[in-house]
Image: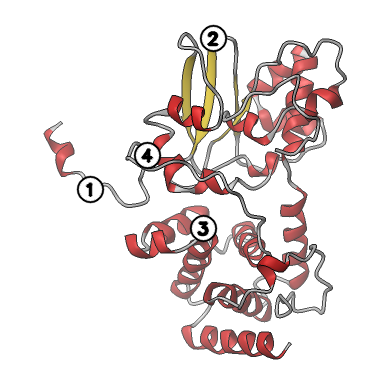
C-alpha cells in the first residue's frame, strides 16, 4: 500500500501483507488516509502521534493477559488483587491497561465464564490486543447469550452439564477478562510455561488451557 | 410486558437473535484499519470525540450499510460523520483529499 501516508515520509514499519496491501484502494481506505491527512494538516493530531498510536496498538497482545493469569495461578495473593482490580494488578507487572475498568471473572470446576459484546465489540484490548473477527461478527454476538453451550461446542469446548455457565455482556465502560482454571498436569511448571498455554480464547472463555497443548503461545 | 411488543430493536442490538455458524476465520489487521483505530484513540485522548459518539454514528448507519460494511469501514464512516457534524472537516476538502490519495496510489 504505497499510498499509505504518515505525512512525514516515515518508513512504514509493518511487514508487508501482499494479499491485503496490493489490493486496489477501496473507498474506505482512501477515506481513512484523507481523514488522517486532514487532521494532521489542521493540527488536530500530529503524524508522529498517529505513528506512535499504531505502534502501541501493535504492541498489545494476548501474551500480556497470559502473564497476568499465570501470575494469578502461581500467587494467590496476586489473584485476590486481580479479582479486586485488574488494571491495578496488571500495573504490578508493568502492563498499562488504560482507564477503562476490566473485571476479572474466574473459572472454577463448577463455573465457566464466557465474554461477548452483543452491541458492538467491547473487549479488554489494552490487556490482550484487538479482538478476533468472530468476536465482532453477527453470529457470535447474537448466539453467545442465547445458546452459549452450542457456541462453545463450535469452539471445541464441551462443558459438563453440572458446570454453571455465566455469559458476560461487555460495555464500553466495563470489559471482562476470563481467568481460566489452572489445568491438571501443570504442577511445578514455571510461570512462563504456564503463560504459554493461556491463549487469547482462554481469556474470552471460548477455550480451556490444556497441559498437553502445543507450546506455541499465540492463539 | 405488553409495552415490550412495541419496543423497537435496532439492527446493531443483535443479542439473542438467530444466526448461523460462527466463522472463525481471522484476518491480520490491514494498515488502514490500524490507522482508523489510531485516529479514534487520539480523538478520544484529545477530547475531540467520545466512544459514545463513535457508537452512535455506527448505530445510525442504516441496516443495509451496517451489514454491508466491514468493522473498520463502520468506524471510519462514523468518525467522518462526527467530524463533519463538529465542522472540523468539510465535505469538499474530504472529497478533494481522497482524490489526491487515489492519484498518489495510482501513480506510486
Relative placement, left or right, of A126 versus A193 is left
> At numbered mark 3, what does the secondary structure look like: helix, strand or loop?
helix
Q: Which residue is mark 4?
A: B15
The residue at 43%/59% (across/down) is B58
Q: Which residue appears at 49% of the width and 82% of the height?
A: B90
- Give the Cα separation between the discs numbered 4 and 2: 25 Å
Badge 2 vs badge 3, beta-carbon distance below 8 Å: no
The mark nearer the N terminus, 4 or 1, is 1
- Please tell me if label 1 and label 2 are on a single chain: no
Element at label 4: loop
Same chain letter for marks 3 and 1? yes
Other residues around mark 3 within 10 Å, as few (<14) / some (14–19) / many (≥20): some
Discs 4 and 2 share one subunit:
no
- A147 relative to B87, above or below: above
**Residue marked by disc 1:** B8
Q: Quadrant of residue B66?
A: bottom left
Can residue A27 be seen at all in this image of the molecule? yes
Q: Earlier in the sequence, mark 4 or mark 3?
A: 4
Amino acid at each position: 500500500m504505497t499510498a499509505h501516508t504518515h505525512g512525514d515520509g516515515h518508513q512504514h514499519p509493518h511487514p508487508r501483507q501482499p494479499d491485503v496491501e496490493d489490493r486496489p484502494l477501496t473507498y474506505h481506505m482512501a477515506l481513512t488516509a484523507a481523514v488522517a491527512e486532514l487532521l494532521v494538516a489542521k493540527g488536530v493530531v500530529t503524524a508522529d502521534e498517529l505513528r506512535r498510536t499504531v505502534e502501541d496498538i501493535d504492541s498489545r497482545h494476548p501474551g500480556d493477559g497470559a502473564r497476568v493469569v499465570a501470575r494469578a495461578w502461581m500467587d494467590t495473593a496476586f489473584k485476590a488483587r486481580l479479582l479486586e482490580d485488574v488494571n491495578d494488578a496488571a500495573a504490578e507487572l508493568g502492563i498499562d491497561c488504560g482507564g477503562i475498568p476490566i473485571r476479572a471473572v474466574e473459572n472454577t470446576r463448577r463455573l465457566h465464564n464466557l465474554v461477548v459484546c452483543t452491541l458492538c465489540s467491547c473487549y479488554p484490548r489494552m490487556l490482550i490486543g484487538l479482538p478476533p473477527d468472530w468476536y465482532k461478527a453477527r453470529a457470535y454476538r447474537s448466539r453467545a447469550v442465547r445458546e452459549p453451550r452450542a457456541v462453545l461446542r463450535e469452539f471445541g469446548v464441551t462443558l459438563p452439564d453440572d458446570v454453571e455457565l455465566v455469559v458476560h455482556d461487555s460495555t464500553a465502560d466495563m470489559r471482562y477478562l476470563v481467568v481460566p482454571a489452572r489445568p491438571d498436569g501443570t504442577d511445578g511448571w514455571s510461570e512462563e510455561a504456564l503463560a504459554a498455554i493461556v491463549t487469547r480464547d482462554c481469556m474470552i472463555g471460548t477455550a480451556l488451557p490444556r497441559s498437553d497443548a502445543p507450546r506455541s503461545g499465540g492463539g | 410486558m405488553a409495552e415490550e411488543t412495541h419496543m423497537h430493536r435496532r439492527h446493531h442490538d443483535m443479542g439473542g437473535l438467530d444466526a448461523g455458524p460462527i466463522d472463525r476465520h481471522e484476518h491480520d489487521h490491514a494498515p488502514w484499519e490500524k490507522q482508523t483505530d489510531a485516529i479514534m484513540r487520539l480523538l478520544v485522548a484529545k477530547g475531540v470525540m467520545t466512544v459514545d459518539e463513535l457508537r452512535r454514528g455506527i448505530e445510525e448507519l442504516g441496516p443495509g450499510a451496517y451489514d454491508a460494511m466491514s468493522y473498520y469501514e463502520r468506524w471510519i464512516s462514523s468518525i467522518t460523520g462526527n467530524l463533519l457534524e463538529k465542522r472540523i472537516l468539510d465535505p469538499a476538502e474530504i472529497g478533494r483529499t481522497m482524490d489526491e490519495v487515489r492519484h498518489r496510489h495510482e501513480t506510486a
